[in-house]
Amino acid sequence: MQPGEARALIDSLPRYMKSPWLFWNRNYGRRLKSVDYYWKEFQAEAGLRGVRLHDLRHTFASHAAMSQETLPMIGRLLGHSEIQSTARYAHLDDAYLLDAAEQIGAAIERMLD
């Protein structure tokens, strides 16, 4: 899904009386304070048993870091006020680290030539 497609999908979701909230309680017309009930239902439908919303936040942060987003930007996207929190979220996988090390090594080799 492209970024524009994601925005179009979000914009197409029904809203309660033009409510600014993406997730709202249809019975009361207010924002949801918890998505636990809906998450359990979604987990079952998507076959994501054992996956927590917290895990998705870590995955989001890690992919953002591997896409060369800065920690301050990732922190803002996650709603963190402290950069230390973001640093704990953003993990780089081994293949990404190996590729980065190779690129750095190649750059140093070019400078020595």
Image: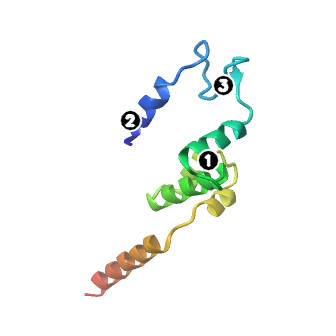
| Residue type at numbered disc 1 | Leu
Residue bearing mark 3: 24
Q: CA distance from mark 3 to mark 2?
A: 23 Å
Residue bearing mark 1: 78
Q: Is residue 33 left or right of residue 7?
A: right
Q: Position of residue 101 (x, y in %)?
A: 42, 78
Q: Residue at x 35, y 75 (%)?
A: 103
Element carrying mark 1 = helix
Q: Position of residue 77 (x, y in %)?
A: 57, 45
Marks 1/3 in contact by CB < 8 Å: the verdict is: no
Q: Position of residue 100 (x, y in %)?
A: 41, 73
| Residue type at numbered disc 3 | Trp
- Assign the N terminus to one quadrant of the image: top left
Colour pattern: rainbow
| Residue type at numbered disc 2 | Gly
Q: Nearer the viewer, mark 3 or mark 2?
A: 3
- Assign the C terminus to one quadrant of the image: bottom left
